[in-house]
Amino acid sequence: MAEPLIPEYVDAKKIFAQQAVIIGELPIARFERFCQSLANSSGTVSVSLRFYFDEQHKRVIEGEVAADVQVHCQRCLEIATIVLSESFKLGVVDSESFIDRLPPDLEPWICADNRLVLADVLEEQLILCMPIVGYHEDNCPRASGFKNRGDQSVSGLSGETKGQAKPNPFAILQSLKETK
């Protein structure tokens, strides 16, 4: 069974009046900015969006995005799969001047015209839910190597031992200061 298609954009006034619900999938490759932080753009993003007016007659988008994405592990630089899942609640406003009128539980989304591009909303949420550093949760091939790094000498030279004192490179400056 084919997944329902998610429209590229919706009418920012009608969709809320209809209290529409959109559920489907989009290819990860569709999100160019998001793909810049990934190892590859394979896979899909599961999307669930609900549009409605709240009690204060504010336009609200409640949504969820979920995807399994591949990133470069920052420990071993191999590809690691991480699971992204994010729920969000956005208040749609016409301009920045209306942001302060939103309740605190709504994040602002500015839609200056009647065209609400859904991929832009979804891409922003995917970027926000990405971890700062991606790595293998378990069984990283290199994770055990990080525990022993403190045993190596800082300079990396094989002839030095930990007890030997290094000459101070600024000693010459001290002697110049004393001659004046």
Image (spheres, helix red, strand yellow):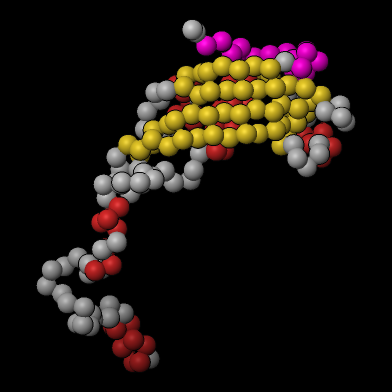
- What residue is drawn where x is 29% and y is 61%? 147
* Residue 166 horizontal side relative to residue 120, left or right: left
Estimate the x, y position of residue 133 in percent, counting from the top left.
Answer: 44, 46
The image quadrant that residue 97 belongs to is: top right
Tell me: residue 1, above or below residue 116.
above
Q: Is residue 120 magenta?
A: no
Residue sitting farthest toward the front: 1
Tell me: residue 53, above or below residue 174.
above
The image shows a total of numbered marks equal to 0
Estimate the x, y position of residue 90 in percent, counting from the top left.
Answer: 71, 31
Estimate the x, y position of residue 135 in percent, counting from the top left.
Answer: 38, 44
Where are the magenta residues, as a range?
3-19
Quarter the C terminus occupies: bottom left
Res. 75 visible in picture = yes
Q: Is residue 5 magenta?
A: yes
* Residue 78 horizontal side relative to residue 120, left or right: left
Estimate the x, y position of residue 160 in percent, counting from the top left.
Answer: 15, 74
Q: Nearer the viewer, residue 20 or 101?
A: 20
Residue sitting farthest toward the bottom: 179
* Residue 38 horizontal side relative to residue 26, left or right: left
Q: Nearer the viewer, residue 63 or 108?
A: 63
Residue sitting farthest toward the top: 1
